[in-house]
Amino acid sequence: MIRWCSKPPNASGARYRAGLEGWLALLPELDAALRTGATVADVGCGRGYPSVLLAGMYPDARITGFDAHEPSIQLARERANAAGLAARVDFALSDAAGYPGTGYDLITFFDAFHDLGDPLGAAIHARDALADGGTLLLIEPYSAGSLAQNLAQNPAAAFGYAASTFLCTPNSLSQPVGLALGAMSGEQTLRGVLAQAGFTAVEKVAETPFNLVLAAQRRPSDQ
Ligand SMILES: C[S@@+](CC[C@H](N)C(=O)[O-])C[C@H]1O[C@@H](n2cnc3c(N)ncnc32)[C@H](O)[C@@H]1O
């Protein structure tokens, strides 16, 4: 696995800070559950920035961040300690398709899903680990779908493809399965993986020049 997420600062942090509150407001049932003490798994949590951000927004939520990169987990713990949130936010070393626990109200992947070798395996694991009615939230780089559309529409796309070529895609290829979605895979590809994992209720929550946010709700009939 490529080691690339171990040093501060967090380049995605400003986007999450600017977007997360608004995105969650568009999911009122989830927002209400978070306000009354939901349990959350933050998968591919890296150095814990989004886990700590969520915990700060929702003082009764309990969050466990999982990542396959041990130095990132250490830094994530230090971040939670420094924020005074270690009682509600903890971190564990785990693959995205193998972390413990069931009955999660929310499972998040912040800029991590496309990095995984086996995003389908991770989505299936998330489906099984969610409570009925629980939500899988994918926060992915924005992509219009095709290379031509992206380069024509979005000045950030060239950076996205460069990062994907040098970081995300090799990372995925270095792992078992190696599906290599790429950072610029886009909504239809992501929806396809979620559908294959058995999610039947998927909605686009938001689209910004930088992020695409998809929510998949686990239904009792999903399998
Ligand atoms: C781009 S970083 C995002 C980190 C964090 N979510 C954030 O937004 O700050 C992608 C993360 O996915 C993790 N990762 C990659 N493959 C993984 C796997 N198979 N299981 C768990 N974590 C994985 C990496 O170690 C890295 O921390």
Image (spheres, rainbow, N blue to C red):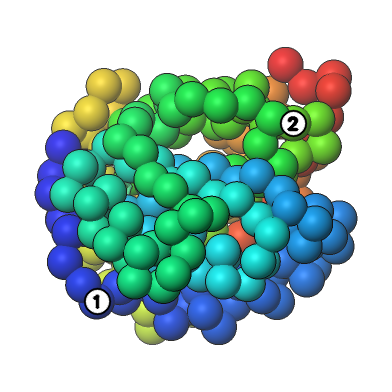
Q: Position of residue 92 (x, y in %)?
A: 35, 38
Residue 89 against residue 104 in the figure, above or below: below
In the picture, measured across the screen, residue 38 lies left or right of residue 161, that is: right
In the picture, measured across the screen, residue 65 lies left or right of residue 57, that is: left
Which residue is more in the foreground, 117 or 97?
97
Residue 129 against residue 150 in the figure, above or below: above
Q: Is residue 132 visible?
A: yes
Mark 1: few, some, or many residues within 10 Å (few <14, many ≥20)?
Answer: few
Residue at which label 1 appears = 9
Q: Position of residue 178 (x, y in %)?
A: 28, 28
Residue 14 against residue 96 in the figure, above or below: below
The image's mark for residue 131 is 2
The quarter of the rendered structure image containing the N terminus is: top left
User: Is the CB atom of the residue marked by disc 1 within 8 angstroms of ligand 1's nearest atom?
Assistant: no
In the picture, measured across the screen, residue 47 lies left or right of residue 199, that is: left
Which residue is more in the foreground, 145 or 142?
142
Q: Disc 1 on helix, strand or loop? A: loop
Q: Disc 2 on helix, strand or loop? A: strand
Q: Is residue 143 visible?
A: no
What residue appears at the point 16 percent right and 66 percent down from the top-left corner? 7
Please identify the quarter of the rendering in which residue 199 is found: top right
User: Is the CB atom of the residue marked by disc 2 within 8 angstroms of ligand 1's nearest atom?
Assistant: no
What residue appears at the point 69 percent right and 30 percent down from the top-left corner? 103
Name which of mark 2 and mark 1 comes first in the sequence.
1
State the CA–CA distance, disc 2 to disc 1.
34 Å
Name the residue type under label 2. Answer: Ala
Q: Residue furthest top?
A: 223
In the picture, measured across the screen, residue 138 lies left or right of residue 30, that is: left
The quarter of the rendered structure image containing the C terminus is: top right
Name the residue type under label 1. Answer: Pro
